[in-house]
Amino acid sequence: MEKLNARFIIYGMAALFAVIMLVLVNPFGYNDMGYREIVETPTGKKYVIFSNGVYVKFPGSKVTTYPNVITISHRGGETTGSTIDAKSILIRFNDATEAYAQTVVRFRLPDVETDMLMLHSEYINREYIAMKGLAPYTIECLKNSAQLMDSEQHYSGGRAQLSQYFQDQLEDGLFILDIQETFAKDTLTGEDKRIYANRIRTNSLGEKVRKDSDLKVFGISIASATIENVDYESQVDEKLKKKIEASTRESVSKQNLVTAQQEAMTAEAEGRRQLVEIEYKEKQVQTQQVVQAETSVKLAEKDREKQLIALEGAKLEAQKIKALAEAEAYAKQKVMAADGALDKKLQAYKEVQGMWATAFQNYQGDLVPKFQTGGGSGGNAGLDFMELMSAKAAMDLNLSTKVKTNKKN
């Protein structure tokens, strides 16, 4: 029994020792997602674990962990969880003005084992890669990019161009710059000024000449590169403010000019419209007057035709009346020639007799003399007078009171 217990104790001690040794030696490793690990064995062999998960390593091996992407942040020291959080980068534009730029660059480490092992041999760990390699290279590329433009060019629309210069150099290497002297007019003062402009050197084939990039040597690529903000120095801000004010005044002047031109065009168009309207109305009046005149002429012509017709009718009627009158006169003449105008003579005789009868009726004197002398027969003077006047009228009218009788042979 004692021998059995002693044996269990020995086995337990051996198992415990094995566990302790397993923990101390730890032949298993684990690579997290988004990372890679470089394993160095005690014999000096190195290899890279790119995939995530558990892997087996030689006991006593040294493991160095790298992120797949190293982020270099220059945001004024703000903590962002990047590999390096540094202060903003001081840059100088081609016109000697300064500014502070905030950038974020993400570098993707090589996926080829030989490149990764060479990078590890050069920098040992990710902190050294970030601090001694990537951060200085980022600053140098940004400063070199700023030398290719003036601050005025940048704030006047050159931000995208600066970002393009920046990323281009990060990926393929720094430009070799040549200085050229040029002259330009200051947009604010209007004065001519001498400018020393930097130009990218090119070879005979027109290709940009560059400084060799460590990134290409180690197979590092750019995942993204961003210039988030550029804070100009005070004199640039003041110049920018004056330019904005001048631009605003110019814009307002242009807008006023455009408004005035538009108003003038509107007034001109309105004037033309009114002229057309007046012309149209005048033409309407003229047309109406012409129509009225033509109508009057036509009416006059119709009236003239009616008058001519009436005149012809009147002429015909007059001719008819004349013909009738002449016929009647001729008939009367024949009648009178036949009876000696007996009717007219009788009428006249009747009228004369009536007159004398009326006169005799109204006579107040004595028809018979009151006194007679001589041996007269004592006749009636009034009757004698009436017979005398009747005989005279008949004589004047050539009226014969005798009845004519037809004589038969």
Image: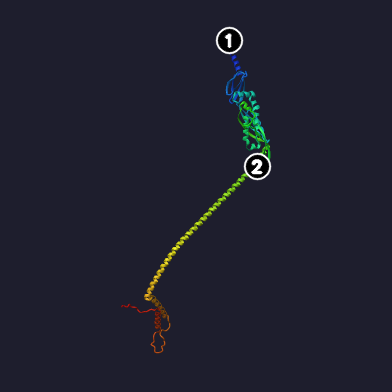
Q: Position of residue 25 (x, y in %)?
A: 61, 18
Q: Which residue is mark 1?
A: 3
Dot 1 alpha-carbon crowd within 10 angstroms: few under 14, some 14 to 19, many 20 or more: few
Asked if one can make out residue 118 in the rendered structure from this viewpoint, the answer is: yes
Q: What mark, if any, has residue 179 been given in the picture?
A: none
Q: Relative to 328, does residue 386 appear above or below in the rendering?
A: below
Disc on the earlier residue, 2 or 1 = 1
Q: Secondary structure at mark 1?
A: helix
Residue drawn at 50 percent across, 57 percent down: 290
Q: Nearer the viewer, mark 2 or mark 1?
A: 2
Dot 2 alpha-carbon crowd within 10 angstroms: few under 14, some 14 to 19, many 20 or more: some
Q: Quadrant of residue 333?
A: bottom left
Q: Relative to 295, does residue 201 appear above or below in the rendering?
A: above
Quadrant containing the C terminus is bottom left
Residue drawn at 62 percent across, 35 percent down: 161
In-image side of 340 versus 208 (left or right): left
Q: Considering depth in this image, is 256 or 384 the residue closer to the camera?
A: 256
Quadrant containing the N terminus is top right
Q: Which residue is mark 2?
A: 246
View extreme (front): residue: 204
Q: Secondary structure at mark 2?
A: helix
Q: Considering depth in this image, is 332 or 242 the residue closer to the camera?
A: 332
Q: Quadrant of residue 309?
A: bottom left
- What is the distance, in whole Å, between disc 2 and disc 1 at their CAs? 105 Å
Amino acid type assigned to the residue bearing label 1 in the image: Lys
Q: Considering depth in this image, is 357 or 284 the residue closer to the camera?
A: 284
Q: Quadrant of residue 384?
A: bottom left
Asked if one can make out residue 167 in the rendered structure from this viewpoint, the answer is: no
Q: Position of residue 158 (x, y in %)?
A: 63, 36
Q: Relative to 258, does residue 379 appear above or below in the rendering?
A: below
